[in-house]
Amino acid sequence: MHFKFLHTADIHLDSPLRGLERYEGAPVDEIRGSIRQAFDHLIDLAIEEQVAFVLIAGDLYDGDWKDYNTALYFNKCMSKLNNHGIKVFLIRGNHDAASLMTKHLRLPENVTLFSTKKPQQIVLEDLNVCIHGQSYANRSVQENLSVNYPLGNSKFFNIGVLHTSLDGREGHDHYAPCSVDDLQSKGYQYWALGHIHKREIVSKDPWIVFSGNIQGRHIGEQGSKGCTLVTVEHGEIATVKHHALDVMRWKLLEVDISNGHSLESVYELLREKLIEELNFNHGMLLAVRLIFIGISPIHSTFSENKEQLINELRATVTEISHEKIWLEKIVFRTKSPTPIEAIFERNDALSELLHSIDNVEFNEIEHTKLYHELDDLYKKLPKEIIERDDFLRLKHEPSDRNTIEEVKNLLVQRLLNIEIEK
């Protein structure tokens, strides 16, 4: 028996993508329409590859629909697959949990939505396949759902569909936690996971895969986005391949000006890097955050001519990209050739401040207590605030004087105007 299937997740169809309007010149319509275009690419790929079925591992929707247009669009896409004999199996995740969806629309006959009450099994006799899955009943699922998934039937090719943080991934809520051992113990040949937006092959024995989302929505979701195409031959997985579906990409681009001795040399370096990115991404629309780094004698020029420099950079991008690059943000993190040690030797207010910081007694117990208090506060904040790229957070519990050193360097950078941001 030979067949193919597609594994996708975290589509967030018609996500509102709040906050884009605050960016001057942002291609808002293109960004907002990118998710539907990527989903169209998914449908086309399924038909082109003649897959037997498509698995959607949660978060098809970003939340309750504003109106029925989102559901009508989805049903139209599903009907297109149905015309080619392609089935669709989906589970609800934390964003489209049953408790969040107040509106309802009958699903096309080729679409199966898994139960929220317990793991459900769907047997495809013609393919000798058994698919196991369970939807979220509510947004915050803290229990290990995988525990109740049944053992795989040795007579079938078994697939598990689960929306989970697994054993935890940075930047994602800890939902339906489980271990790799939990999944491996079920005896399935493939686990189609959702919730983590970055593609990841967790295991190849058996295959445990996060397909990632189909379209990046902000600077934290960089690089190629798409789905996973799986080929099965004689009851065993032959190939597992990533297929890009996105129509625009986010890129954090660092430009090291350590060897730059003039603004013109910086512009030339930027031109080279941007052309390289356009070629690598085949000319698709790029949302780029530029970060200038490096210890350079022209740091002072950056500081003194910030407004002019930013406009020159934007002009350079426009000239090169022909509207294929949007500068989401420009950040300057360059450093003066003057080392921090030299500042210690000076007889001024900044030198005195650094000496005072250096003499601060490090109290590990108090710092640990503060860390836990802040962590409790973070958990109570809305997710939209936590996910912002400019949100300040203590990422690691302090355990030595490294924290003091980081504060000292940060102060020096700020006071010397080494870091400028717009």
Image (cartoon, grey):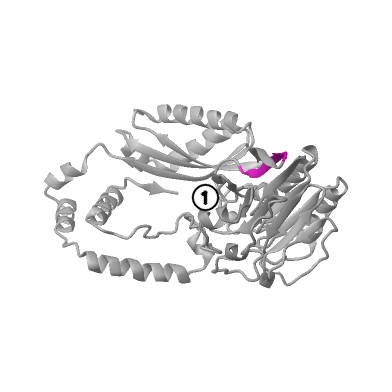
Residue at the spot x=52%, y=60% of the render? Answer: 178
- Mark yes or no: residue 240 visible: yes
Name the quadrant containing residue 265: top left
220 vs 313, nearest the viewer: 220
Give percent across and percent down for residue 266.
Answer: 42, 30
**What segment is highlighted magenta in the picture?**
225-234
Residue 232 is a magenta residue: yes
Which residue occupies the foreground of this view, 53 or 97? 53
From what the image shows, is residue 362 above or below residue 251?
below
Under mark 1, the amino acid is Gly
The quadrant of the rendering that contains the N terminus is top right
* 72 magenta-colored: no
Task: Determine crowd level at label 1: few under 14, some 14-19, many 20+ residues with C-alpha closer than 10 A.
Answer: some
Q: Residue 34 appears at what percent x and percent y?
A: 68, 47
**Tag 1's secondary structure?**
loop
| Residue receiving disc 1 | 220
Residue positioned most to the front = 154
Would you say 346 lies left or right of 127 here? left
> Residue farthest to the right?
83
| Left or right for 217, reference 344 | right
Please identify the dominant SS of the magenta region.
Answer: strand
Do we see residue 11 in this rendering?
no
